[in-house]
Amino acid sequence: MAKISPVSIKYIIHAKFESEGAVEKPDIIGAIFGQTEGLLGEDLEMRELQRTGKIGRIEVTTNSEDRKTIGEIEVPSAMDKTETSIIAAALETIERIGPGDTKITIEDIEDVRGSKRDYILERAKKLMEKLGGAGNNVSEMTDEIKTSSRTSKIKSYGTENLSCGDVSGDELIIVEGRADVINLLKNGVKNVISMNGAKLPDSIAELSKEKTTTLFVDGDRGGSLIIKNVTENAKIDFIAMAPEGKEVEELTGKEILQALRKKIKKDEYIFSKRKRGVREYKEETKKSRKIKKLTAKEKEKIQDELEKIPKSKNAVVFNDKLERIKKGPVRRLSSLELNEAPYVIAIDGTATPRIIEICEKLGCNNLIATNFVSTDTNINLIPF
């Protein structure tokens, strides 16, 4: 039987399996070859692929628990991504191993060559820093290197260690977080400093007294709340906003320049109107929806339910019967598909203004979180 060279491996298929009863490694490998035989035609016959070195040695790890056998399967492949994906999908058609029902699930198809590219990029970045310059923009790799060269100049300012670029000039751009600073530096905007959150640090308040300042915020309600907070506590000359629904950290270079060109004077900014593509929420609109708050008994029941769920940056949604109807990553809260309005949303972490805004749009009554950056909402906020 031919062996696959480690050098020629392109992908590794990672799969998990669960089988009723006790099964051994030979049973699993035998099922892979036997139950895929004739399924994909001669060109993708598993035995022939391994004989010719197109797939390598199949590795299997097993663990028995509660009269079941669970484990992982790894299949190295030297084929292209299309053929490798077909082989991976074929593994999921295996329904029995030995006498027991079995379920195989593909967890990932790892591009082994990616680690080599990562090494090349990291090494090139270090070499670039030694050279102190940038080459021609001829490929994605050189773009990455040039980006790293710019963002490596990120500094800290003040007692709060605020992320910043070059703040020595007469003009200053104030953004919310470190990721915003990195994106602006990456796109050639150097005179930028972050607040490291929605609250205005004292260092920026002092710095704003001696410079011409532009507050650059996300294009959502959270950005509007930051404008209100910062303009009341610091000298802000201009306001710039990202396009509606976008964050500063995800803007392209062109979008950044367009937003900064369209900045407006602070005195021209009106909170009660739609400005720069951002829909403002009037206070009376926010207060008009009737909120049903958790009773003490309901709160106790919800907390008991949450104790059973491992903490892993998830959002858990409950209906008014306190039944769990949805669970997913906090970062995908806005895309959760709900068939009924949520009564309670519990998140593992801090409720930022953006998260609170999403909960309002979903029609949530009660929001449970570790802590809250903003309380400007009529949703019932419950610390946990």
Image (tube, rainbow, N blue to C red):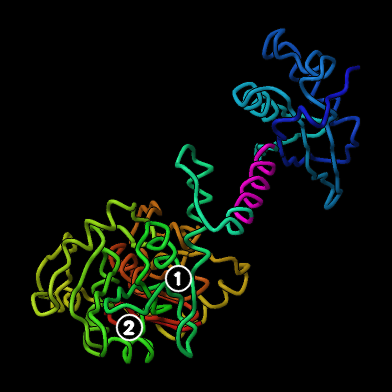
**Mark 1 sits on what residue?**
178
12 horizontally vs 234: left or right? right
Q: Amino acid at mark 2?
A: Thr
Work out which quarter of the rendered image holds the N terminus and state it: top right
- Is 234 placed above or below 261 here? below
- Is 62 placed above or below 177 here? above
Q: Quadrant of residue 110?
A: top right
Give residue 222's mark.
none
Q: Which residues are magenta?
A: 113-126
- Is 332 placed above or below 198 here? above
Q: Residue 274: x and y, percent?
A: 12, 65
Give residue 375's mark.
2
Residue depicted at x 32% and y 77%: 169
Secondary structure predominantly adopted by residues drawn in magenta:
helix
Residue farthest toward the top in the current orientation of the protein: 42
Q: Residue 273: x and y, percent?
A: 9, 69
- Kindly state the secondary structure of the residue where label 2 is placed: loop
Asked if marks 1 and 2 touch (Cβ < 8 Å), the reply is no
Is 108 a magenta residue?
A: no
Q: Residues within 10 Å of mark 1 (few under 14, many from 20)?
A: some
Q: Amino acid at mark 1?
A: Arg
Instruction: Identify the mark nearer the N-term, 1 or 2.
Output: 1
Question: Which of 50/227 is in front?
Answer: 227
- Kindly state the secondary structure of the residue where label 1 is placed: helix
